[in-house]
Image: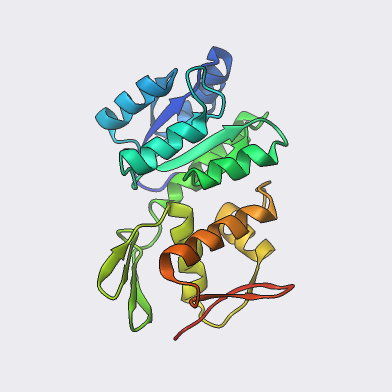
């Protein structure tokens, strides 16, 4: 898999030098620019200076945890454009849920193989270069894929990137029921290890922002988009 487009910058916020070196060696040949930070202060400074496409956050930075940093970037700095991925301890489902709730687009454990890490990063970056489109799932809602923009009654609604991806998936096929497994595979990929509760967290946030009536739960099956 190749990275679509050029000029991607990845900000790696990782205190452990060995892990930072592993990330560097894994991604050096992928045609991306890498920048490194060791703590929250450096991360915020670099975000303001280099405009990264992707931020890889260590969940256990020494001066703060990645969830607080992610929440600060998404809410205080109103950072919407870059993808944020939090790298969590292995098999720590609570850390992954906390990461998604703080505004992260991806949460995963560090792969042991550099090739797998490279594949994950390329898949994430390729989301930024997906085909552009604008469509109206209802008369009152416009979804602009190029600008990651959602308008409801001509007013913009702010979504995290993964919330947007799930909304776009459901709204593209109104009435079709998607199982949690299908949503997970289509949004995070078949090798994702996120738990099913992650899907529920994003659906809950979509309903809070868009309104309860647009996304319907089909008990025991999954979710579907209602065209009003």
In what quadrant of the picture does the C terminus appear?
bottom left
Q: How many marks?
A: 0
Q: Residue furthest bottom?
A: 228
Q: Residue furthest top?
A: 17
Q: Is residue 197 above or below residue 210?
A: above
Q: Residue at x 50, y 22 (%)?
A: 14
Q: Which color mode does the image show?
A: rainbow
Instruction: Pinpoint residue 148: horizontal percent, then vertical percent.
Output: 34, 59
In the image, 113 versus 165, the foreground residue is 165
Q: Residue at x 63, y 37 (%)?
A: 95
- Residue 92 lies left or right of residue 152; in this view the side is right
Instruction: Pinpoint residue 205: horizontal percent, then vertical percent.
Output: 50, 59
Q: Residue at x 61, y 58 (%)?
A: 199
In the image, 109 versus 226, the foreground residue is 226
In the image, 221 versus 133, the foreground residue is 221
Q: Is residue 143 above or below residue 112?
A: below
Q: Is residue 90 visible?
A: yes
Instruction: Pinpoint residue 49: horizontal percent, then vertical percent.
Output: 25, 28
- Residue 136 lies left or right of residue 162; in this view the side is left
Q: Is residue 1 visible?
A: no
């Amino acid at each position: 898999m190749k990275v679509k487009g050029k000029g991607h910058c990845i900000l790696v916020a990782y205190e452990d030098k060995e892990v930072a070196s592993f990330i560097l060696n894994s991604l050096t040949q992928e045609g991306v620019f890498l920048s490194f930070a060791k703590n929250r202060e450096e991360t915020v400074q670099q975000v303001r200076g280099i405009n990264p496409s992707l931020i890889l956050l260590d969940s256990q930075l020494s001066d703060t945890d990645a969830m607080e940093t992610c929440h600060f970037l998404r809410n205080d700095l109103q950072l919407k454009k870059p993808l944020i991925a939090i790298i969590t301890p292995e098999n720590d489902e609570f850390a992954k849920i906390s990461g998604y709730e703080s505004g992260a687009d991806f949460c995963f454990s560090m792969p042991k193989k550099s090739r797998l890490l490279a594949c994950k990063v390329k898949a994430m970056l390729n989301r930024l270069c997906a085909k552009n489109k604008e469509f109206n799932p209802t008369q009152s809602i416009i979804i602009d894929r190029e600008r990651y923009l959602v308008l409801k009654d001509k007013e913009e609604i702010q979504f995290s990137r993964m919330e947007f991806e799930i909304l776009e998936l459901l709204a593209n096929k109104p009435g079709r029921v998607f199982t949690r497994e299908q949503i997970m595979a289509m949004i995070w990929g078949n090798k994702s290890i996120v738990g099913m509760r992650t899907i529920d967290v994003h659906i809950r946030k979509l309903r809070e922002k868009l309104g309860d009536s647009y996304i319907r739960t089909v008990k025991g099956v999954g979710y579907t988009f209602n065209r009003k």
